[in-house]
Amino acid sequence: MTDKKKKEIDPLLQSDELSECTVVTSLEKVSFPKDERAYILFISGPLIGKMYLLEESTTIMGRAPDIDISISDSRISRKHLCIHLETGKAIIEDMGSTNGTFVNGERVIRRVLENGDKVHISSDTFFKFAVGDAAERMFQEEMHQMANYDAVTGILNKHAFARRLREEFSYARRRKHSLSLMMIDIDFFKKVNDTYGHMAGDYVLNGVAQRIQSSLRDEDITARYGGEEFAIILRNTDAKDSMMLAERVRHLIEEKPFQFEDQSIPVTISVGVSTLKGDNFNSAKKLISYADECLYKSKADGRNRVTA
């Protein structure tokens, strides 16, 4: 084992379905010029925000402390994957890991990486690959993404949601418009992780987010509120219309199981809805609290239902 470590770059100093089978992708893909440099940027997990320059011919990544890039994540293997640099190509290879290596949502054994590829090695840890000047652009874009968007689902995170809700609440009260809020919780989500694994759990989270967004208007705002919980801000929407929309979303999640590799995963959701009308709520926090109360009632009454 070489004692040469990868050079860590401090960025602050720089100016709806997966395939059902394991994929081994052909290595006949676009290469990059020999004089270009290859980088990876961690966008989630213990090394979040860290960028590494790939300098050695082979870079080994995993949980072991004595390898090139060591990641303190119990869900990845000691020697999880390696990246080979070969004549203008960066080739990623799974090293027989327990939970697998996924590139852009597909489980892979060995394949060529291309600019912008997203590599997922656990439910907590994933990174992006970039070459040359694209690395700096990627860093800038991902820093903005990390600050405002959830890494697993691609929708707003809780911090950005809270800011948007305050803005929407103030605007709706000034204009005397209705404003509705949906709080959604995936039923028995822990069982999904325990039964199918955390990678499948992340896939379900992403799939639920996509189905929710597919049923909304462009002006509606979706966020991951935390864990398996989502929040939706519905502009200029009264109680009746928000209930109809909530039922549509609930049915859309329930009607078709999610397919993760060769596994079919049934999912249902519980929903709570609150609506601002006039001065019935004096703060965005109160609007959230009431929607949460309704959500917990849906769960207490048997789940897979909507309460307002």
Image: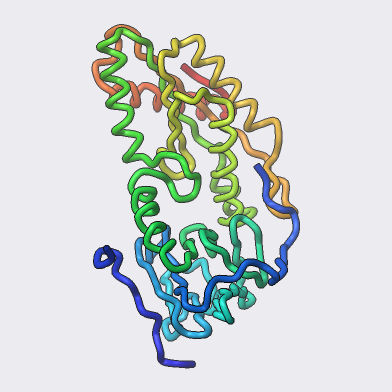
Question: Measuring 48% from the left and 62% from the top, which residue is drawn there?
Answer: 128
Image coords of residue 17 (percent x, y): 67, 45
The reply, left or right, for residue 293 in relation to residue 29 is: left
Above-or-below relation of 175 to 192: above
Quadrant of the rendered structure where residue 31 is?
Answer: bottom right
Above-or-below relation of 185 to 40: above
Q: Inspect this view and state whether residue 296 appears.
A: no
Q: Inspect this view and state whether residue 214 appears.
A: yes
Question: Measuring 39% from the left and 57% from the top, which residue is drawn there?
Answer: 137
Question: Measuring 45% from the left and 20% from the top, which residue is drawn there?
Answer: 273
The reply, left or right, for residue 106 in relation to residue 70 is: right
Image coords of residue 288 (percent x, y): 35, 26
Above-or-below relation of 60 to 141: below
Quadrant of the rendered structure where residue 12 is?
Answer: bottom left
Q: Nearer the viewer, residue 4 or 65?
A: 4
Image coords of residue 129 (percent x, y): 49, 65
> What count of labels does the image hold?
0
